[in-house]
Amino acid sequence: MANNLEVFVVGAGVVGLTTAIRALEAGYKVTIFAEIFPGDPKSIKYTSCWAGANHVSFEGYGAVMHELDRDTRAIFLDLIEEDPLIPVMTRALLTYAQTLDGDEQKQFDHLSRMYPDFRILEASELPEGVVHGAFYTTICVDVPRYLSYLMSRFLAAGGQAFRTTIASLSSLLSVTDRPALEPFPLGSTNSMPSSPVALINCTGLGALTLGDVLDTNMYPTRGETVLIRAPWVDHSMTYYYKNSDVSYIIPRQSGDVIVGGTFQVDDWHPTSRPETVKSIKERGISVYPELLPPGKRENQNINDLDVVEECVGLRTTRKGGLRLEATLLDFEGKTIPVVHNYGHGGGGYQSSWASANRAIELLHASLGTK
Ligand SMILES: Cc1cc2nc3c(=O)[nH]c(=O)nc-3n(C[C@H](O)[C@H](O)[C@H](O)COP(=O)(O)OP(=O)(O)OC[C@H]3O[C@@H](n4cnc5c(N)ncnc54)[C@H](O)[C@@H]3O)c2cc1C
């Protein structure tokens, strides 16, 4: 139901787009402002384009994220049922561990509570070198297609967007000093937005440097992956090694497959490192030989992989967990509510819908609307 109150969403990653859609659905007039949008050349400043992305809830992320993951999983399952063309699919996931120390045991216990069809594998079902394994159904998101889907859904529902780079949230409130705005998509006939009643901040790692946010709890967890072409890959896998390395395999609807990966805390290096790429490929084909084309699996040669792209992304991690809260911003004698929704680390897709729902509840509460 339209309330015609104008809201600005900053950020067009998976979190910003999903939140903007929910704000529109709640009746607000919504404008997105962002430096980078779906379909742009891939950038290290846009984490969403580098994600796997599947649904593997992390025990270490804490109770709030667990609830968001659980609720988002249910929403994704509904979306898949409602729209068979959505670039999101369910797939079997096998998870294996070479050791079962305290952390791995906790992760397996958590997974058993999160996924209804979770099942511990029998010893006879485990590959050599694996001491513990489980099966459950995950959700695999075809990231580039899904970001375009979200953008189209937002625009089709009446939202509008501008490309801009801002130094602070308050710069968007200034009538005289507003940063340069370019309609997105280029050529669209957007009306210049007037004064919003609230802002929603979905800037991911941008929150670290945004003038009136400066959230020094934000840091990157660098993830290198290799995107390969292997349309025959039919299930997802997570494989925990003795030395804490992890291999993960995520098929996409397009037939491309993400092979990961690394979790490098506070590492901003924006391009792939050859030795890491080699190791990801070697580990990948040793635990999942079907990454190689049929007929080329015997020799286990990484050069037989059909590589599409070497990828590096920076997970939007935050000390203390994600920031989902409302604050007030003082600007030129006015006070305006700001809802923050960022810092989802390695789980921004799998928590996106429930996180957006919470952000809209905070918005209603700040404005006294419903
Ligand atoms: C290798 C890898 C694998 C992953 N796998 C998974 C997975 O399997 N499942 C899962 O759920 N998640 C996964 N993730 C995590 C997921 O990608 C992130 O949690 C999510 O993309 C964060 O989205 P976001 O919208 O908060 O941030 P971003 O995608 O970074 O978007 C930030 C937006 O804010 C804009 N912005 C920022 N600062 C400014 C500014 N000053 N002015 C204007 N605009 C600004 C940017 O332009 C952009 O539009 C993975 C991530 C990586 C790197």
Image (tube, rainbow, N blue to C red):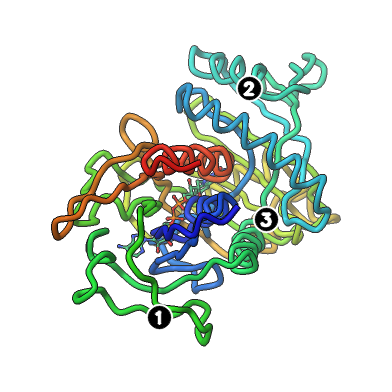
Q: Amino acid at mark 1?
A: Glu
C-alpha distance separating marks 3 and 2: 22 Å
Q: Secondary structure at mark 2?
A: helix
Q: Which residue is mark 3?
A: 142
Nearer the observer, 7 or 83: 7
Q: Which residue is mark 1?
A: 182
Q: Earlier in the sequence, mark 3 or mark 2?
A: 2
- Where is residue 207 drawn, in percent x and y? 29, 51
Decide if ligand 1 comes within 8 Å of the CB at mark 2: no
Q: Which residue is mark 2?
A: 111
Residue appearing at x 62%, y 32% in the figure: 71
- Where is residue 129 drawn, in percent x and y? 66, 23
Q: Earlier in the sequence, mark 2 or mark 1?
A: 2
- Where is residue 175 drawn, in percent x and y? 24, 73
Q: Nearer the viewer, mark 3 or mark 1?
A: 1
Most distant residue in the bottom direction: 187
Given contact means CB atoms under 8 Å apart, are the residues at marks 3 and 1 in contact? Answer: no
Q: Amino acid at mark 3?
A: Asp
Q: Secondary structure at mark 3?
A: loop
Residue appearing at x 51%, y 70% in the figure: 160
Please give the label number shown on residue 288.
Answer: none
Q: Earlier in the sequence, mark 3 or mark 1?
A: 3
Q: Quadrant of residue 8?
A: bottom left
Q: Is residue 130 left or right of residue 336?
A: right
Q: Secondary structure at mark 1?
A: strand
Relative to 343, is 159 above or below? below
Relative to 228, is 315 above or below? above
Q: Is residue 247 left or right of residue 323?
A: right
Query: Can residue 278 be seen from the camera position used here?
Result: no
C-alpha distance separating marks 3 and 1: 28 Å
